Amino acid sequence: MENVIEIRGIIRNFQLGQETVYVLKGIDLDIKKGEYVAIMGPSGSGKSTLMNLLGCLDTPTAGTYILNGNDASTMTDNELAEIRNREIGFVFQTFNLLPRTTALDNVALPMIYAGASKKERTTRAEEVLTDVGLADRMDHKPNQLSGGQRQRVAVGRALVNKPSIILADEPTGNLDSKTSIEIMNLFDEIHAAGNTVIIVTHEEEVAEHAHRVIRLRDGIIESDVRNK
Ligand SMILES: Nc1ncnc2c1ncn2[C@@H]1O[C@H](COP(=O)(O)OP(=O)(O)OP(=O)(O)O)[C@@H](O)[C@H]1O
Ligand SMILES: [Mg+2]
């Protein structure tokens, strides 16, 4: 199977005044199309920094990142925005929905940047919201939805442009345990539909849904285990 992600020698430092903060210290990683991966590790080990690189929200200090055959490590901000919109669906711990915007319009938003017509956007957003179990909540705004429903909207928004990878950074971090299980069941369905899914989590029960668990420690990969 082809690699969706190929990372070689990724280093990410941050400059804080005179001080250099060394966060990712040499990461090599291949992820194949259709894999279901959990990334774990202590707070501060570099999980979100790595996810931001994978999601083309950031570029490395050194090393290469090939995403679906495109070298994302040397792209300009505009090129990154373009590849991100096409290839990446990102789900955040805090949902990051537009507050005064309906579920339908939140989900349809990435399609505006992709250049779809109003009719295409509405049809596709309705389809995706139905898939995530919110057919009866399309006109609700985020504050008229529960936490789990908000995260479903965010998952719908991540899926709407049919990206090649779905990245989720602690998607259940703000949800109670029952709602977390519902959201993880949704990720299981998304994976079963053929998507590549990468989830950062602190919780072993969440990681158990994945088929491969990568553990970071202090900016390097400590272990990488396929369990299914
Ligand atoms: N923009 C930045 N400038 C300076 N240091 C940063 C920056 N972003 C992250 N760091 C540092 O990098 C380290 C890793 O941060 P990161 O957010 O990747 O950790 P994490 O593994 O996601 O932790 P958590 O589990 O708490 O979310 C931390 O020590 C953090 O302070
Ligand atoms: Mg983090």
Image (spheres, helix red, strand yellow):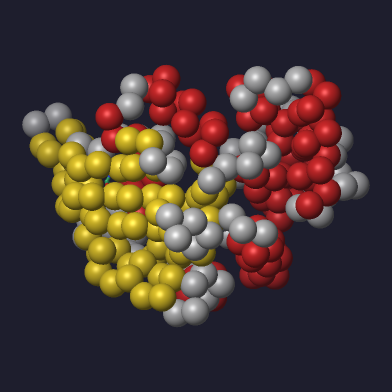
Query: Which of 149/68 is in front?
Result: 68
- Residue 97: x and y in percent read 65, 36
Side of 102 relative to 53 (left or right):
right
Q: Is residue 198 visible?
A: no
Quadrant where the N terminus is found in the figure: bottom left
Q: Please identify the residue farthest to the front as the structure is shown.
A: 1
Query: Which of 63/71 is in front?
Result: 71
- Number of numbered discs overlaid on the protein picture: 0
Q: Residue at x 49, y 72 (%)?
A: 211
- Could you say which quadrant of the image residue 116 lies in? top right
Q: Is residue 151 visible?
A: yes
- Residue 13: x and y in percent read 19, 41
Side of 186 relative to 74 (left or right):
right
- Residue 105: x and y in percent read 76, 30
Q: Residue at x 20, y 37 (%)?
A: 61
Looking at the image, is 124 positioned above or below residue 187? above
Side of 89 relative to 180 (left or right):
left
Q: Residue at x 19, y 50 (%)?
A: 9
Q: Please identify the residue farthest to the left as the structure is shown.
A: 18
Q: Residue at x 53, y 60 (%)?
A: 34
